[in-house]
Image (cartoon, rainbow, N blue to C red):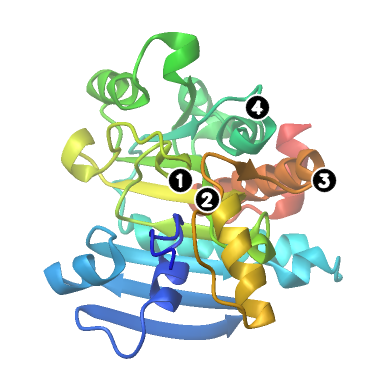
Amino acid sequence: METSPVRTDLALEARESASGELRGVAEERRELRGFHVTRLRVLDERGEEALCKPRGEYVTVELDRLLRREENAFSDCAELLGEVLRSLLGALPDGGCVLAVGLGNEYITPDAIGPWAMDSVLVTRHLAQLPEFRHFRPVAALRSGVLGTTGIESAALVSLLCRELRPAAVIAVDALASRSTERLCRTVQLSDAGIVPGSGVGNAREALSRDTLGVPCIAVGVPTVVDASSIARELASAAGVSLSGELPSGLIVTPRDIDRSARDAAKLVGYAIDLALHPGLTVADVDMLLS
């Protein structure tokens, strides 16, 4: 029987894989603005062991309304994600800069969520002295690239920039791995526990977190890939079949329409960051400022 662990970056899926009540994990499920929202809190070492996730809060928003193209779904979802992100950031000092980081390789579509999201982030740090921008929070944006194209670890680059900018917080956006094809580009996970770039595809790098950066680090991720062995398990489970022998390894699958889906998800995340950092703005305001 194949018993290797299912690869997933989603705390919700880790919770689904565990049976019964988990000690050290608090769970809350709600429907907000028509979207299913699951909030998991890993409270202590027992929770970390149960979910294989570091201590912190993990909020998963399912994008069904958006995928059905319902009226005002994009605005509602961006505002909801902005509210969740603002709550995870907590109270930031007035005028404190926030550094938004797009992790991943913009030339590989399933890995481009982070860099593409930065296209929709309002960069205002260099405008802070202008009267018309006095009510905007200073925001800087970075596309960190990947080690193979820059020769620099993303964590090292972000850490060096934090020493220079001294931001009040970092928001790191990345593509994630799911265990289910049903969640690809259909889910957003937000967490105050930071992120380990590349972990979903077995290429884990140094973590971005409060411990490594010295400031709060909020991770925002969208699953874009699933391991082939996870698909095999998913199909076998649906058919009531038990798997034995070796399953495919090293094969990553992504949706056929990944280009459009990744672009849409990246825009959604970028707008959510804008609404979180600049209270009072609307989606229409962000449209105008980005045009």
Residue contact at pointers 2 and 1, CB within 8 angstroms: yes
Residue contact at pointers 2 and 4, CB within 8 angstroms: no
Describe the element under mark 3 as helix, strand or loop: loop
Three-letter amino acid code at disc 3? Asp
If you read the primary sequence from the N terminus, does the residue marked by circle 3 or circle 4 appear first? 4
Three-letter amino acid code at disc 1? Gly
Q: CA distance from mark 3 to mark 1?
A: 20 Å
Q: Which mark is residue 211?
A: none
Q: Quadrant of residue 180?
A: bottom right
Residue contact at pointers 2 and 3, CB within 8 angstroms: no
Q: Which mark is residue 108?
A: 4
Q: Which residue in the structure is indicated by mark 2?
A: 177
Q: CA distance from mark 4 to mark 1?
A: 15 Å
The spot of residue 64 in percent (x, y) is 73, 71
If you read the primary sequence from the N terminus, does the residue marked by circle 2 or circle 3 appear first? 2
Q: Which mark is residue 200?
A: 1
The spot of residue 207 in percent (x, y) is 28, 38
Q: Give me the residue at 65% from left, 32% from top.
A: 116
Three-letter amino acid code at disc 2? Ala
In the picture, the quarter occupied by the N terminus is bottom left
